Image (spheres, rainbow, N blue to C red):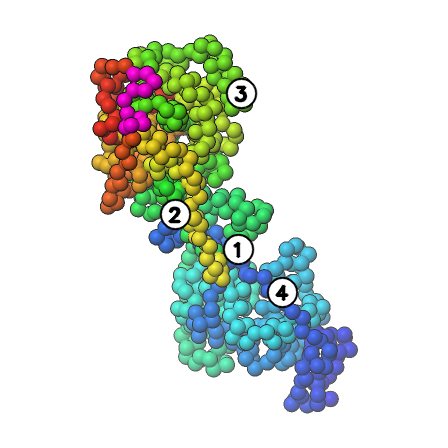
């Protein structure tokens, strides 16, 4: 018997025949081998091939990539997108007879057996590319440590199981299809899964553009990617270089390249570029918007029944998520904030832009970068959004909430010039003056609400709003009913940033609830859309790994009577020309808005809208707005004794809107129905003309100008 025959016989005697799959038909060096499935009775077994983990890509509204999420960085590609030299390199070193044999390479297996028997264990694999693909599928689909260990076990039982699967794979796919699947699933080290990711990670190129040196390097990396991971250090790179040269020698031996080509290639350095493969929102140019998108997927059951399933989909599903973010509008917000508030400032400014009529979030920006570095004064949460989208507790919205009381009054039939006489202080006359939506008496007759400055006299809906008179709005809220105001706010999507129920106290109209810019901007967008409220949306389209497209439409409802919204827009437009934003001025097109400043300048806001775009800006100190007020502070290099809504938030909003809307034809507000809202209905009195003091101080000064023929201006305080 020849040495080959004796070797095979020894293997059989050792009980290894099931894994060796080598049966000599005749003796001698020309021995022929019959198929394993025929002689050993091994039957193909269908391999379950779950979709490979593939990165999810997030795009802005223009199709530019703004973020990516992955558990394993992988980009599946087709075989024709892989350089021919890469195919030659991987086949030369891993399975040079790949296109000639079936599920198992008998010659390779015999060589491995000889080595294994000599060592007393499994020292050499001898696996075909098909078997390696099977092993990777089992490893990638393992959901427990036990399953992972089984997929890696150094046993002949595993080899036999892999062979059954490999037989089925060979029956199911062509050789090219198998090679494509193998190249997409293989791990190359440095966090790169699949040939496309490896080409980018190692050399900053696509797999289609790999050179001989690069291809040989990647082909050498698959054998032991952890020990040749070039990102781990000098020794690892040295091992990878040595392995690359082995591949080049093998390619020359098989005449895939010439010896001269091999020698020339071996003389070249490794060339590892360590190209970053950024993932997560930390690496996004728009991290706050990215966090909003991420949390939208993780919290919405449309994307999976459990959070674990949704996380798996986001990180491994290979989705392409198209979003509503407009890069030009985003840059406008970023520039405006940077102009007025520096990243090093203790207070943080944040802004959201929303499209009326769709609820699409067009921009989310903040004065600080996102991150965890205290030294760089970074924000560790989404300051622009609510807690459900990665945000925190928010900041009290101040007198921006007076708009909801105004809308309620107009909805109940009050006319623009209707009003009443108020003093500089307000106390609820009875405990029953205010009832929350549970019907409970919550008024406190011992508590006095005051105006920041002056403010006595007759105030109409228009002049009370322009002056942002606290005592007027307290009395107005008493008249229309606290619960009705709360219901108006809720109909426009108003919810506390922390997710807790709205605080329904008599000072609700003064903005005691903590809010976030997205929520406030979206509520004001509904006024610009003539009362049509749309749920905030950041995701407009998702394409799955198979090319199936799901388009998401705005979810809207008519929350406010259209003519009521028109009347409110008319009044709020006067905030720019007759109210406390007069020193800031308008934006050169129809716009309405409301400033907000909380008690003793804890926080400051401005919320405004046009029919084309709405926005809200907040400023507060994340260390705690109550203990770190906006008094005697420096923002953007400018000292402020006190910061009001028109001091910084208003100018940020103005600069943003002018830039964001550049080139977009202005849309006019729908004229007020004067038959319904003009003149005086319930209570009206002549007043003397008087403009409020410069700034955002909500002093409640008397203003006589009629809002029916003016546009643009305003302010608000809670004090």
The picture quadrant where one finds residue 35 is bottom right
Q: Position of residue 26 (x, y in %)?
A: 70, 90
Q: Which residue is mark 3?
A: 439
SS at badge 2: loop
- Magenta highlight on residue 651: no
Within 10 Å of disc 1 (Cα), the crowding (few <14, some 14-19, many 20+) is many
- Magenta highlight on residue 678: yes
Q: Nearer the viewer, residue 444 or 656?
A: 444
Give me the C-alpha separation between circle 2 and circle 4.
Answer: 38 Å
* Mark sitting on residue 316: 1
Give me the C-alpha separation between circle 3 and circle 1.
Answer: 50 Å
SS at badge 4: loop
Q: Which residue is mark 2?
A: 324
Would you say residue 139 is visible in this rendering?
A: yes
Q: Earlier in the sequence, mark 3 or mark 1?
A: 1
Would you say residue 58 is visible in this rendering?
A: no
């Amino acid at each position: 018997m020849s040495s080959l025959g004796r070797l095979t016989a020894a293997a059989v005697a050792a009980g290894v025949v099931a894994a060796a799959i080598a049966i000599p038909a005749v003796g001698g060096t020309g021995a022929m081998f019959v198929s394993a499935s025929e002689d050993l009775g091994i039957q193909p077994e269908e391999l379950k091939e779950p979709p490979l983990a593939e990165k999810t890509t997030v795009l802005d509204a223009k199709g530019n990539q703004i973020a990516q999420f992955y558990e394993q960085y992988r980009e599946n590609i087709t075989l024709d997108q892989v350089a021919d030299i890469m195919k030659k390199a991987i086949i030369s070193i891993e399975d040079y007879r790949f296109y000639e044999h079936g599920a198992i390479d008998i010659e390779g297996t015999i060589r491995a057996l000889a080595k294994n028997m000599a060592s007393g264990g499994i020292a050499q694999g001898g696996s075909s590319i098909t078997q390696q693909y099977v092993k990777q599928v089992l490893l990638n689909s393992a959901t427990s440590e036990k399953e992972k260990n089984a997929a890696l076990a150094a046993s002949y039982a595993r080899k036999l199981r892999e062979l059954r699967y490999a037989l089925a794979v060979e029956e199911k796919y062509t050789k090219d299809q198998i090679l494509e699947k193998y190249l997409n699933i293989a791990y190359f080290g440095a966090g790169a899964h699949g040939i496309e990711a490896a080409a980018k990670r190692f050399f900053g190129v696509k797999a289609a553009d790999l050179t001989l040196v690069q291809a040989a390097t990647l082909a050498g990396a698959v054998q032991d990617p952890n020990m040749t991971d070039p990102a781990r250090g000098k020794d690892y790179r040295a091992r990878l270089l040595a392995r690359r040269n082995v591949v080049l020698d093998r390619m020359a031996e098989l005449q895939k390249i010439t010896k001269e080509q091999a020698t020339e290639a071996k003389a070249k350095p490794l060339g590892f570029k360590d190209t970053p493969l950024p993932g997560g929102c930390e690496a996004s140019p728009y991290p706050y918007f990215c966090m909003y998108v991420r949390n939208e997927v993780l919290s919405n059951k449309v994307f999976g029944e459990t959070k674990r399933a949704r996380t798996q989909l986001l990180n491994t599903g290979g989705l392409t998520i198209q979003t509503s973010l407009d890069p030009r509008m985003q840059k406008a917000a970023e520039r405006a904030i940077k102009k007025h508030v520096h990243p090093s400032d203790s207070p943080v400014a944040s802004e959201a832009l929303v499209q009326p009529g769709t609820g699409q979030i067009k921009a989310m920006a903040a004065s600080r970068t996102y991150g965890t570095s205290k030294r760089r004064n970074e924000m560790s949460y989404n300051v622009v959004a609510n807690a459900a989208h990665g945000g925190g507790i928010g900041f009290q919205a101040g007198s921006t909430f007076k708009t909801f009381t105004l809308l309620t009054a107009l909805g109940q039939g009050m006319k623009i010039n209707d009003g009443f006489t108020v003093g500089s202080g307000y106390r609820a006359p009875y405990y029953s003056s205010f009832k929350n939506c549970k019907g409970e008496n919550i008024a406190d007759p011992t508590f006095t609400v005051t105006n920041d400055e002056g403010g006595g006299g007759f105030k109409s809906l228009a002049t009370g709003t322009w002056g942002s008179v606290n005592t007027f709005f307290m009395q107005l809220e008493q008249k229309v009913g606290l619960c009705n105001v709360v219901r108006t706010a809720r109909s426009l999507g108003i919810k506390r940033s922390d997710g807790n129920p709205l605080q329904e106290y008599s000072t609700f109209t003064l903005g005691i609830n903590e809010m976030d810019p997205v929520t406030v901007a979206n509520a004001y967008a509904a006024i610009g859309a003539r009362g049509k409220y749309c749920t905030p949306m950041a995701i407009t389209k998702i394409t799955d790994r198979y090319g199936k497209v799901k388009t998401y439409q705005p979810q809207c409802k008519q929350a406010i009577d259209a003519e009521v919204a028109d009347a409110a827009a008319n009044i709020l437009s006067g905030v720019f020309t007759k109210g406390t934003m007069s020193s800031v001025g308008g934006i050169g097109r129809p716009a309405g808005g409301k400033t907000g400043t909380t008690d003793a300048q804890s926080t400051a806001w401005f919320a405004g809208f046009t029919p084309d775009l709405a926005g809200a800006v907040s400023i507060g100190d994340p260390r705690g707005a109550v203990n770190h007020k906006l008094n005697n502070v420096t923002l953007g290099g400018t000292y402020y004794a006190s910061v009001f809504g028109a001091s910084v938030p208003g100018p940020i909003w103005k600069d943003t809107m002018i830039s964001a809307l550049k080139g977009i034809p202005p849309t006019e507000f729908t004229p007020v129905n004067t038959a319904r809202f003009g003149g005086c209905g319930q209570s009206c009195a002549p007043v003397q003309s008087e403009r409020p003091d410069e700034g955002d101080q909500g002093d409640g000064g008397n203003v006589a100008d009629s809002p029916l023929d003016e546009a643009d201006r305003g302010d608000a305080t809670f004090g």
